[in-house]
Image (cartoon, rainbow, N blue to C red):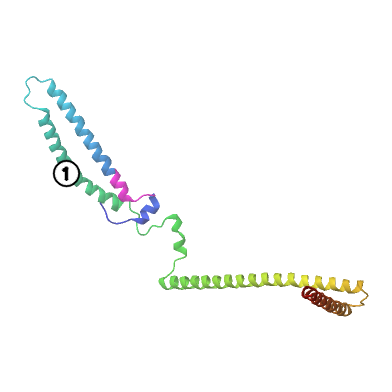
Amino acid sequence: MSVDPMTYEAQFFGFTPQTCMLRIYIAFQDYLFEVMQAVEQVILKKLDGIRDCAISPVQIRKCTEKFLCFMKERFDNLFGKMEQLFLQLILRIPPNVLLPEDKSQETHSYSEEEFHLLQKEIEQLQEKYKTELCTKQVLLAELEEQKTIQTKLKQILSLFDELENVGRDHGASDFREGLVFLIQNSRKLHNIIENVEKEGKRLKIS
């Protein structure tokens, strides 16, 4: 069998030419065995009709096997020549022929130097894409951080609005007066808590 992989032919046929020839070889060989078995059966039937025949079935089998080996040897020799003919002239695509899916190579052929330049350009584009992807991830992270900060600012503004409303309820005209009012009241509350704690300690001691 041929050792040439014949990959271009396999692309066109959907199978390797060597596989095709191997299947033909096996089919011919099986057919040869079947023919020899049929011939042997015919000879045995003919011998059954002959009285006092000195030829035994064992001798017939030996002769059949010997003849089969002779035929197989001749067949292998002929098949080897037929295989070379098929692989060289029938199942081979000429080197000047392109498959339909490869026709673009005729109009877009590249030299080795141009191919390396294209390959280098592809690598540069891949690196550029990776860089842009990393930049995008950084920007998304910053955007998420800004959303978090914006949410906290809204909470602080809402707190200031509440403080301003409390100040107005207690007579403060603006936010600054309301904040002073809250600080004074918090100090008073803190003093009251300290007095209560001291009184509680004094009562426990007594």
Position in image of residue 165 (x %, y %): 88, 71
Circle 1: residue type: Glu
Residue 145 occupies which quadrant of the picture? bottom right
Identity of the residue drawn at 52% across and 70% down: 126
Using the image, determine if residue 56 lies above or below residue 24: above
Using the image, determine if residue 175 lies above or below residue 36: below
Position in image of residue 112 (x %, y %): 41, 71
Identity of the residue drawn at 54% across and 71% down: 130
Q: In the visual, does 90 lie left or right of 162?
A: left
Q: Decide which of 24, 184 is in the foreground and name it.
A: 184
Can residue 131 be seen at all in this image of the molecule?
yes
- Please give the range of residues in magenta: 14-23
Q: Residues within 10 Å of mark 1 (few under 14, many from 20)?
A: few
Q: Decide which of 166, 38 is in the foreground and name it.
A: 166
Position in image of residue 115 (x %, y %): 44, 70
Q: In the visual, does 154 lie left or right of 78?
A: right
Using the image, determine if residue 58 lies above or below residue 102: above
Residue placed under numbered mark 1 in the picture: 73
Q: Is residue 190 magenta?
A: no
Looking at the rendered structure, the number of numbered marks drawn on it comes to 1
Position in image of residue 35 (x %, y %): 22, 33
SS assignment at label 1? helix
Identify the image quadrant of the C terminus. bottom right
Residue 4 occupies which quadrant of the picture? bottom left
Q: In the visual, does 9 lie left or right of 103?
A: left
Q: Is residue 20 magenta?
A: yes
Can residue 90 be seen at all in this image of the molecule?
no
Residue lying farthest to the front in this orientation = 206
Majority SS type along the magenta span: helix
Q: Decide which of 190, 114 is in the foreground and name it.
A: 190
Residue 8 occupies which quadrant of the picture? bottom left
